[in-house]
């Protein structure tokens, strides 16, 4: 797919399909996975959120919105760094993240509590790309999800999962030269 300029990305949060311990049922459809990303990408996207819940039959409940990256991990999001000086271990070490997704045209809210990385006995690591200009910090994560009806806050279901939760951060600043 061509060259990826990691310095064109400011920050992202990403997770591959994470399988629930049991299906999350919404409007009669059993969703078994959640996947998605939040990205600030060059001068194109400012905290774009994409993703959804997926069923084994291919049904998708798309996200309508999400808590911003800055509110999910403020210390990580706001820190400035330099080439070859990773920031993830220091700013994400607490390992607890609480955030929300709006799904199905904002008719439902999915409250997400996460316990991530070493603090919870799970693996974590980082690696640097683009000659030390970009850090990826990934960790195994315990997910606790509560589905609520928007407006009333009625709890409809709770499920758990274990899967990856990844943070990506530009350490040196925006560069659109490639």
Image (tube, grey):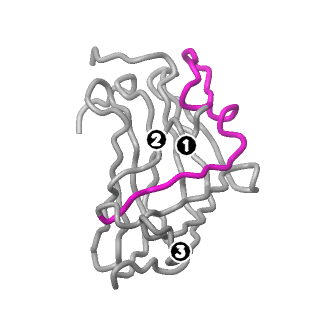
Residue under the point 68% across and 47% down: 95
| Range of residues picked out in magenta | 75-104
Residue under the point 51% across and 35% down: 70
Mark 3 Cα shell of 10 Å, populated few (<14), some (14-19), many (≥20)? some
Quarter the C terminus occupies: top left
* Cα separation between marks 1 and 3: 22 Å
* Cα separation between marks 2 and 3: 23 Å
Mark sitting earlier along the chain (2/3): 2
The quadrant holding residue 5 is top left
Residue under the point 41% across and 59% down: 35
146 left or right of 102 in image: right
- Towards the viewer: 70 or 141: 70
Q: Contact (CB < 8 A) between labels 2 and 3?
A: no
Q: Give the number of the mark in front: 1 or 3.
A: 3
Residue 147, position in %: x, y? 49, 70
Q: Contact (CB < 8 A) between labels 1 and 2?
A: yes
* Cα separation between marks 1 and 2: 6 Å
View extreme (left): residue: 1
The quadrant holding residue 34 is bottom left
From what the image shows, is residue 158 above or below residue 15? Answer: below
Q: Which residue is mark 2?
A: 68
Q: Which residue is mark 1?
A: 72
Q: Which residue is mark 3?
A: 155
Mark sitting earlier along the chain (1/3): 1
The quadrant holding residue 43 is top left
Q: Total number of numbered labels?
A: 3
Q: Secondary structure at mark 3?
A: strand
Q: Secondary structure at mark 2?
A: loop
View extreme (front): residue: 152
């Amino acid at each position: 797919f061509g060259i990826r300029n990691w310095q064109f990305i400011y920050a992202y949060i990403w997770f591959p399909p994470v399988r629930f311990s049991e299906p999350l049922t919404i409007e009669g459809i059993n969703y078994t996975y959640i996947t998605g990303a939040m990205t600030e990408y060059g001068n194109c996207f400012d905290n774009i959120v994409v993703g959804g819940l997926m069923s084994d039959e291919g049904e998708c409940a798309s996200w309508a919105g999400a808590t911003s990256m800055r509110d999910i991990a403020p210390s990580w999001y706001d820190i400035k760094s330099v080439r070859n000086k990773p920031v993830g271990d220091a700013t994400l070490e607490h390992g607890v993240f609480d955030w929300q997704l709006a799904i199905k045209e904002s008719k439902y809210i999915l409250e997400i509590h996460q316990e991530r990385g070493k603090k919870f006995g799970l693996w974590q690591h980082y690696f640097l790309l683009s000659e030390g200009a970009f850090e990826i910090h990934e960790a195994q994560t315990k997910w606790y999800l509560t589905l609520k009806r928007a407006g009333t806050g009625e709890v409809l279901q709770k499920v758990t999962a274990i899967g990856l939760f990844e943070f990506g951060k530009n350490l040196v600043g925006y560069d659109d030269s490639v």
